[in-house]
Image (cartoon, grey):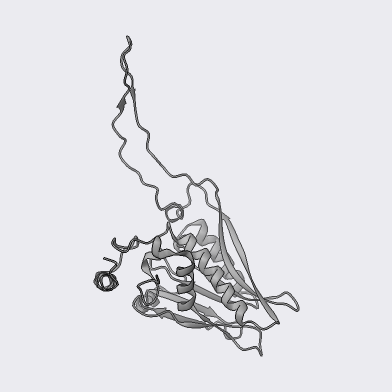
Amino acid sequence: MPSPFPGMDPFLEDPGLWPDVHNTLIAVIREFLVRQLSAKYYARIEERVYISEDDDPGRTVILPDVRVGERPEPVRQGGTSSAATLEIAKPLVIATLLDDEIHEPFVEVIDRTDRQVVAVIEVVSPSNKVVGSRGRESYGKKRADVLRSPCHWLEIDFLRSGTPWFPRQMTTQGDYFVYLSRIEDRPNSYLWPIRLPESLPVVAVPLKDGDADVPLDLQTALATAYERAGYDRVVDYRKPPVIPLSEQYDAWADQLSKSKNLR
């Protein structure tokens, strides 16, 4: 079953689900590009790797299920004993990040002749939008390096929460954004603001001078990722999304879900 939403599905923004959404969408984007690129180019998936320590503010979205609760009442141990009955206190249950290395994939378009990276395509993760986090620091360094290089930069932000990477005043124009920086047009850049009820746009992936842009249909890419991963079996549309909707969108999403017999 496809997503009931005409554009971005806000239920996919759940930080607990997002890593899978991110990986699946990156793979689909690479596949779509490979289908359209001439023999002069190829696309590959690379990874940024950073270390997230215990004091990393971004761990709140890396480990979204961590909860701090009250200490439970002690449990009295059964059986008889001449000694006083011991009480075994239940511990708090916490989530632990077993591997402090965080891997975030992205797509590169490469010229086969000289192995030069021509374009970088990033899909923003929740930790990339947490101020002061290791994820934002890692993402920001990569972003700055590309913007100073002879390489195009395409940034896809399908997350409503967090601090964006472009001027805050632009956030009033959309809920989701796609940002493109073309080598030949810097310092000017391009922004696609997208409202939640709108379909996702077809955007340009620039190549080398003289070669036509490759169109990237983001709506079809998201729908393909949704279908391949079977997110209709994962998402419970009877409940509100983990990242809350505004009052206006909440009523719209409720009516939409009911029209699809999901509530």
Q: Position of residue 235 (x, y in %)?
A: 37, 62
Left or right: 51 in relation to 16: right
Q: Position of residue 237 (x, y in %)?
A: 32, 64
Q: Position of residue 75 (x, y in %)?
A: 31, 27
Q: Is residue 128 visible?
A: no
- In-front residue for pair 136/84: 84
Q: Is residue 56 above or below residue 89?
A: below
Q: How many marks?
A: 0
Q: Is residue 112 above or below residue 232?
A: below
Residue 83 falls in image quadrant: top left
Q: Residue at x 34, y 77 (%)?
A: 197
Residue 172 falls in image quadrant: bottom left
Q: Residue at x 39, y 70 (%)?
A: 1
Quadrant (top left, top right, bottom left, bottom right) of the C terminus: bottom left
Left or right: 196 in relation to 228: left
Q: List the single residue furthest toward the right.
A: 113
- In-front residue for pair 143/13: 13
- In-front residue for pair 59/34: 34
